[in-house]
Amino acid sequence: MKTALITGAGRGIGYSIAQFLLLDGYRVVAVSRTESDLEKLAEYGNIIPFGCDISDVSERKRLVEFCTQNQFIPDVLVNNAGAYLQDNIFSEPSLLPDNLEINLIQVRDLTAMFWDGMKTKGNAYVFNIVSVLGKSVRSEAASYSMAKHALGAYNQLLFSEGRKHGIKVTGIFPSSVYTSSWDGSGVNPAQLIAPSDIAKIVVSCLSLSVAAVPDEIHIKCMDENF
């Protein structure tokens, strides 16, 4: 049975990816700060819910120890967890340390912790959910933009490293995705990318031949306002 580990799986993009992979027969470790958010995923297949604040170093180590003890090395690692923390380039205090921790450092650390096991297992795949702000900037989200640019650079480095060891790496750069953060905004969900769109892209990538791997996938809304 193929296995997957998905961070930020309690809602939105991560939840949808978990749902699709479970339906595709994967055994999934679904990670969320709020473990109760993962309960409904049990309807779709073989899920192992894991409550964890992935931004905490000790919590990341606890997750890896749990997987090691249960001989769980993911065939697919989805680095989805992140947070949109707004500030500008002159904000005091700056939110750059916080944005870097949750949107970059935890991704680097968690991937590094599983990397050797995935190399040994072979035919593994890493997905990094980046953002359109990994290529552009937003003044009211300065630190977030910087962190996501850094995550885009990390994805490029990991892609190159993965090709040496038979591990596929794809960065997904979506613009506005309709998640719970848009609740009450008055925005029509049909104007935004659906979380299931991202999940379908992941499933599609996993169905490619061994020789094919997209390094980056960019998805924009049809509505240019988003």
Image (spheres, rainbow, N blue to C red):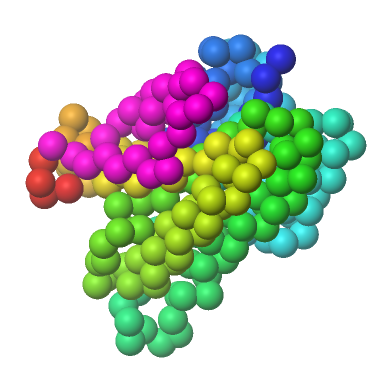
- Please state the horizontal and vertical placement of residue 170, each as a whole percent of the image: 47, 41
* Position of 163 relative to 97 (above/below): above
- Quadrant housing the N terminus: top right
* Viewer-nearest residue: 17 or 208: 208
Tell me which corner region of the image, top left, top right, bottom left or bottom right, holds residue 153.
bottom left
* Position of 165 relative to 112 (above/below): above
- Please state the horizontal and vertical placement of residue 215, each as a whole percent of the image: 43, 43
- Please state the horizontal and vertical placement of residue 207, each as a whole percent of the image: 48, 19
Task: Kindly identify the residue that appears in the image at 17 percent across and 48 percent down.
Answer: 226
Is residue 200 found inside the magenta-colored segment of the image?
yes
Tell me which corner region of the image, top left, top right, bottom left or bottom right, holds residue 76.
top right
Is residue 46 found inside the magenta-colored segment of the image?
no
- Please state the horizontal and vertical placement of residue 38, each as a whole percent of the image: 60, 30
With 161 as the anchor, is 94 left or right in this view?
left
Task: Kindly identify the residue that appears in the image at 27 percent across and 40 percent down.
Answer: 219
* Position of 80 relative to 151 (above/below): above
Which region of the structure is painted magenta?
193-222
Asked whether residue 42 appears in the rendered view, the answer is no
With 214 as the anchor, is 29 left or right in this view?
right
Direction right: furthest residue: 69
Asked whether residue 79 appears in the rendered view, the answer is yes
* Viewer-nearest residue: 27 or 181: 27
With 50 as the anchor, is 155 left or right in this view?
left
Task: Kindly identify the residue that appears in the image at 46 percent across and 21 percent down.
Answer: 208
* Position of 109 relative to 71 (above/below): below
Tell me which corner region of the image, top left, top right, bottom left or bottom right, holds residue 142.
bottom left
With 37 as the anchor, is 11 left or right in this view?
left
* Viewer-nearest residue: 127 or 199: 127
